[in-house]
Image (tube, rainbow, N blue to C red):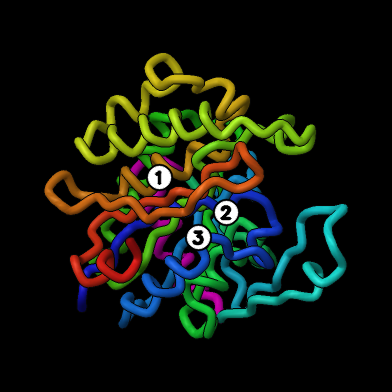
Amino acid sequence: MTRAPSLFISHGSPMFAMEPGVLGPNLRQLGASLRDLSAIVVVSPHWQTMGIRVAGVARPATIHDFGGFPAPLYALKYEPPGAPALAADIVGMLAEAGMPATIDPQRGLDHGAWVPLQYLKPSADVPVLQVSLPRDMDVEGALRLGQVLAPLRDRGVLIVGSGSLTHNLYEFRSHVRDPEYAQEFADWIAAAIARRDDAALVQYRARAPHAERAHPTQEHYLPLLVAAGASSPDESRSLIRGGMTYGVLSMDSFGFGLDGNAMKQAA
């Protein structure tokens, strides 16, 4: 079985579901090149729990976990099969690594999962499950979570950390338009990823320009560390261009372990 990559995908606003921008077509092209996936595991900031929970539902529902958006957005559905057996395996893997987890038999897919996946795998024919983001997880813990999940890639499981490369919702809602600082932060992250400097990614709060402005809270940044943690030191790291939406939300995303053909399509 071909080893699956890991991805960090910026999902930005829920309106990404209706406004594909630069990233949507790139995800479609990338997804078409990702064949023979056995499942997709998503870690999203929109499912935060006490401790780690793993969704074990056979048919995950589409969760519209947002308010105040246009009515057509709430009519969208993404309904892939779940993966209960894989969920049980993941609970076992986490327990062996000293990260106890429990099965959630009802949890569907929040917009951090279904919005990017509707571009990446629009046919919804690959089983999908989510692993929650603990409320008390820090940057080191997120990297460790990715490392524990990494062996799933050898089973054809795509690991997706879904967040936002920049995520200042106060500025978004206040119609602040200042892409210069957001791009400077995004460029710093891209450079750290390109040089395989995971220590810099962990220490971003102290080292990256505008870090606290780009991420007043960390939950949308942590999935990047999950994706990086699931990678190997010697494999490719690739920028998937996403552009800038609403003047402050960078949609740039990253692939770890993508082959050259996949990135030729997605760049």
**Residue 34 relative to residue 13: left or right:** left
First in sequence, mark 1 or 3: give its number.
3
At mark 1, the secondary structure is: helix
* Left or right: 145, with 48 as reference point: left
Residue type at mark 3: give it. Val
Residue 22, label in figure: 3
Residue at the location (28% across, 33% down)?
192
Return the residue found at the far left.
234
Q: Position of residue 204 (x, y in %)?
A: 40, 23
Tell which of 251 and 76 is nearer to you.
251
- On whether residue 94 falls in the magenta region, the answer is yes
Residue density around tag 1, few if under 14, some if 14–19, many if 20 or more, within 10 Å: many
In the picture, the quarter occupied by the C terminus is bottom left
Q: Of all residues shown, which one is farthest toward the top?
A: 206
> Counting residues from the N terminus, which is met first, the one under dot 1 or under dot 2?
2
Residue 230 position within the rendered picture, expressed as x and y whole percent measured from the top left: 31, 50
Q: Is residue 97 magenta?
A: yes
Q: Circle 1 is placed at which residue position?
A: 226
Residue extent of the magenta highlight: 81-99
What amino acid type should be assigned to the residue bearing mark 1?
Val
- The residue tagged 2 is 11
